[in-house]
Image (cartoon, grey):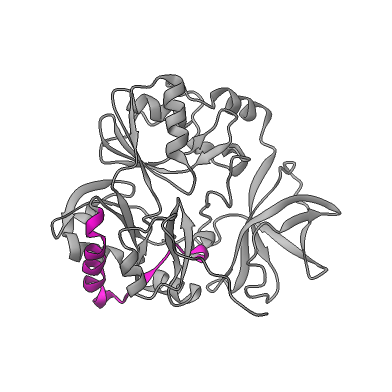
Amino acid sequence: MNFKPEISFSTRIRKSPFFESTMKWGCKGFTVYNKMYMPTFYKTFVDDYWSLVSDVTLWDVGGERQVEIKGKDAERFVEFITPRDISKCKVGQCMYIILTEKNGGIVNDPVLLKLDENHFWLSTADSDVLLWCLGIASANKFDVQLREPDVSPLSLQGPKAPDLMEKISGNWVRDLKFFYFKETTIDDIPVVIARSGWSGEVGYEIYLMDGEKGNKLWEIIMKAGQEFKIAPAAPSQISRIESGMLSYGNDMTLDENPFDLGMDKFVNLQKKADFLSKKALTDIHKNGPTKELIGIEIPGNFQDEFSSDYVPIYSDSDKVGRITSSVYSPRLKKNIALGIINKRSGSINGSYFIKKNNSDFEINVCDLPFLRNK
């Protein structure tokens, strides 16, 4: 029997404020992200990718839910859940942070937005960050209020994004520095516009602060973007792997710590504030990580053949790691992947291979990113 599996829509999974618009504009696939339906592609994955790298695309990323942290101990609380020093974060600034458990394992890698003194949002990847934060706040008696606010982001990504954003909001967006944001309105719709986004292209994230206006906001942007050849799309696995951008749940989990993934710059063991994973990460730093993140090129013309994730990686007869994310790159014309392997000795590179259809295919270990946009 030949059939295609489907995800059935139900009330158990929430719909974003932009859901009706994504259906109207031809979304053909969804995933579930933070218990919300999130689009995966419209035309095809490759067609959507070319729109992203050539023009401008609009993504419904409402599944990136916000955890709002307010109260007297809000900054102390954020310091406690991340090894990154946030003491110099300014109001109106974003920071990429790692949330770590007591043992150093990665819980999530959100973007932190500082809206005011002792008022933050965590724009989260796919995991139960709010529940985790509630548990930590209760156990450690932080004076904070934690909730999921009515905030749902859109992402506007691509080389023409600045032109479109200027048309919608004015000249000031050109001066918005990377990882800074501003509270404003679009046609009286309250939003936060941040110079950020999960792609290798220039872009913005537009945080809608009134869920009833989602479809109106979508249509405003799509209409304004016609002259720039705007297309609806979704987070591009091709683009983010080309750019060496990690995905929580794929390339990092509770089983990895920041040092395993070369994220040392997001860890400050000497910061003044106490944090949950300080002892564990100090020990790991002293003894050295046991894993490392690598880029992988798979030689040969195997277009889309190696799209399956978690393919084991071997050296000699030993399993030494796994491919965590893989894709065929139309610009590089090769299969590329991210992987995690056992930590190598300083001068030893080694020979690595994967298995496909009972055959061994040697892979090339390479530096990240595969592509670096100007």
Q: Quadrant of residue 214?
A: bottom left
Q: Which residue is at a point 58% across and 42% down the rendered structure image?
A: 262
Q: Quadrant of residue 213?
A: bottom left
Q: Which residue is at a point 78% across and 52% down the rendered structure image?
A: 350
As drawn, the residue found furthest toward the front would be 11
Q: Which residue is at a point 18% across and 66% down the rendered structure image?
A: 167
Q: Position of residue 359 (x, y in %)?
A: 82, 69
Most foreground residue, 326 or 12: 12
Q: Position of residue 232 (x, y in %)?
A: 36, 71
Identify whether 147 is placed above or below 219: above
Q: Quadrant of the C terminus?
A: bottom left
Identify whether 150 is placed above or below 102: below
Q: Is residue 228 magenta?
A: yes
Identify whether 55 is placed above or below 77: below
Residue 107 located left or right of residue 322: left
As drawn, the residue found furthest toward the bottom would be 2
Q: Position of residue 282 (x, y in %)?
A: 59, 25
Which segment is the magenta one?
Answer: 211-238
Q: Quadrant of residue 11?
A: bottom left
Our reading of the magenta stretch's main secondary structure is: helix
Q: Quadrant of the N terminus?
A: bottom right
Q: Which residue is at a point 30% across and 65% down the rendered structure image?
A: 161
Camera sees residue 231: no
Q: Is residue 182 magenta?
A: no
Most foreground residue, 352 or 188: 188
Q: Position of residue 12 (x, y in %)?
A: 44, 54
Residue 277 located left or right of residue 219: right
Camera sees residue 345: yes
